[in-house]
């Protein structure tokens, strides 16, 4: 350490100095530490919630979704299905028929989105992990069953233990609606409630899963589907949960120009953008708070310079140049900033570790996790060091210029 740095350190850590200036310097370092710790903790909690949202989304979103460019439904050719199933990296290809329907259970009714799926759908999705009642079973011998979202089930008063059938209605595609008796113009399929799912409110109040054969009967279709949902091997899925671009291009080539193929990110583009923008906004807002906190450093250095005028006069008498004296205050500013960064990172990481290990801070209400989720990402730590370090460095430069004046 050079002489200017040694003097700056003595001013900051002098044991016999307990005046107001040292207290203000300590408060400045503590402010930086608290802000830095808050950045670590808040971004880590956000990462935890981000992971939960993505996990929910991945539970019912296929790796690749094939939809027709024109029209709502299409009949997949045997050649297309065989080609997709034979593709390396493809685990399952599931045909899905989806439409908005009218539900009736006893005396209650609701509007929902019915999703007709085949027998392989249950085995490749993670929806069974979110069952709160019954089983994810759509066919039991000759009995056709349905699995419904929890909010819809509560709205209808539906229970899997009751024998009352769930009635699913949809207007006939080939008949005009009768104004005298509208119900006579609706096609009806009766299903036994087999299970209730609970992921998140938007999902729970929207979906009911039914056998695709029942859905085709209701909509008066034979082999038509709305989409093909493709689930890939885990080796073809990246850390971000998105399937490899190579597999997506191969599927696009097989499907042809009449179809669009979207990965998970493209299927939920607004969700992924919102999650990214929210995290950036949180980071920038907290950095702005750090900028305000850093002004305390300027105040403490200005007061320190006034207090140490006699020391500066002695140094000048000994031949010290103005630049040397200015470097003392610049380095003291850097020391305050980086001391705060180090303490803040240690405290923030320690709090995150304790929350991960013991879950001291609990979530209110009935949520899927008991305690606030915490995920520390080292890229976030590097961004925090870079952001707060840059603020500290610019504050030090400003302090040096103030000292010159």
Image (tube, rainbow, N blue to C red):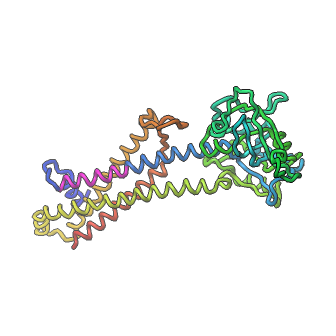
Would you say the magenta stretch is mainly helix, strand or loop?
Answer: helix
Picture coordinates of residue 274, whole percent (x, y): 56, 56
Which is more toward the observer, 78 or 195? 195
Picture coordinates of residue 288, whole percent (x, y): 38, 60
Q: Is residue 35 magenta?
A: yes
- Left or right, 391 with reference to 153: left
Q: Is residue 161 magenta?
A: no
Q: Against 217, is 265 above or below? A: below
- Left or right, 25 with reference to 248: left
Looking at the image, the residue that sits furthest to the front is 180
- The magenta segment is 21-36
Q: Give the quadrant of the N terminus.
A: bottom left
Residue drawn at 63 percent across, 39 percent down? 151
Picture coordinates of residue 184, whole percent (x, y): 84, 45
Residue 343 in view:
yes
Looking at the image, the residue that sits furthest to the bottom is 405
Q: Give the quadrant of the C terminus.
A: bottom left
Please tell me in which quadrant of the rendered image residue 140 appears: top right
Please tell me in which quadrant of the rendered image residue 167 appears: top right
Residue drawn at 76 percent across, 32 percent down? 165
Q: Against 170, is 389 above or below? A: below
Residue drawn at 85 percent across, 29 percent down? 142
Label count reads 0
Residue 86 in view:
no
Which is more toward the observer, 393 or 261? 261
Picture coordinates of residue 53, whole percent (x, y): 58, 45
Please tell me in which quadrant of the rendered image residue 297 appears: bottom left
Residue drawn at 31 percent across, 64 percent down? 395
């Amino acid at each position: 350490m050079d002489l200017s740095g040694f003097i700056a350190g003595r001013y900051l850590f002098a044991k016999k100095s307990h005046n107001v200036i040292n207290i203000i310097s300590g408060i400045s370092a503590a402010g930086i530490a608290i802000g830095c710790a808050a950045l670590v903790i808040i971004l880590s909690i956000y990462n935890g919630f981000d992971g939960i949202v993505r996990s929910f989304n991945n539970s019912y979103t296929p790796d690749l979704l094939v939809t027709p460019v024109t029209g709502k439904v299409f009949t997949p050719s045997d050649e297309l299905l065989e080609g997709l199933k034979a593709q390396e990296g493809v685990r399952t290809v599931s045909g899905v028929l989806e439409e908005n329907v009218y539900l009736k259970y006893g005396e209650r009714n609701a509007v929902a989105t019915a999703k007709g799926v085949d027998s392989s759908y249950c085995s490749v999705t993670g929806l069974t992990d979110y069952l709160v009642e019954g089983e994810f079973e759509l066919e039991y011998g000759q009995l056709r069953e349905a699995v419904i979202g929890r909010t819809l089930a509560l709205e209808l008063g539906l229970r899997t233990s009751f024998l009352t059938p769930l009635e699913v209605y949809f207007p006939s595609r080939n008949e005009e609606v009768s104004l005298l008796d509208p119900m006579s113009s609706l096609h009806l399929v009766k299903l036994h409630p087999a299970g209730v799912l609970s992921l998140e409110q938007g999902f729970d109040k929207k979906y009911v899963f039914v056998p695709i054969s029942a859905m085709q009967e209701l909509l008066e279709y034979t082999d038509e589907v709305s989409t093909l949902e493709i689930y890939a091997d885990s080796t073809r899925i990246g850390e971000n949960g998105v399937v490899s671009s190579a597999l997506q291009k191969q599927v696009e080539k097989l499907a042809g120009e009449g179809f669009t193929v979207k990965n998970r990110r493209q299927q939920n583009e607004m969700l992924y953008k919102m999650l990214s923008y929210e995290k950036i906004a949180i980071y920038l807002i907290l950095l702005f708070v750090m900028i305000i906190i850093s002004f305390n450093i300027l105040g403490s250095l200005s007061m320190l310079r006034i207090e140490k005028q006699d020391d500066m006069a002695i140094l000048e008498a000994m031949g010290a140049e103005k630049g040397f004296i200015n470097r003392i205050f610049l380095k003291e500013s850097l020391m305050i900033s980086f001391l705060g960064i180090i303490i803040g990172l240690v405290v923030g990481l320690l709090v995150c570790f304790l929350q991960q290990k013991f879950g001291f801070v609990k979530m209110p209400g009935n949520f899927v996790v008991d305690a606030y989720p915490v995920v520390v990402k080292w890229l976030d730590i590097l961004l925090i060091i870079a952001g707060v370090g840059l603020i500290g460095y610019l504050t030090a430069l400003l302090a040096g210029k103030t000292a010159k004046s």
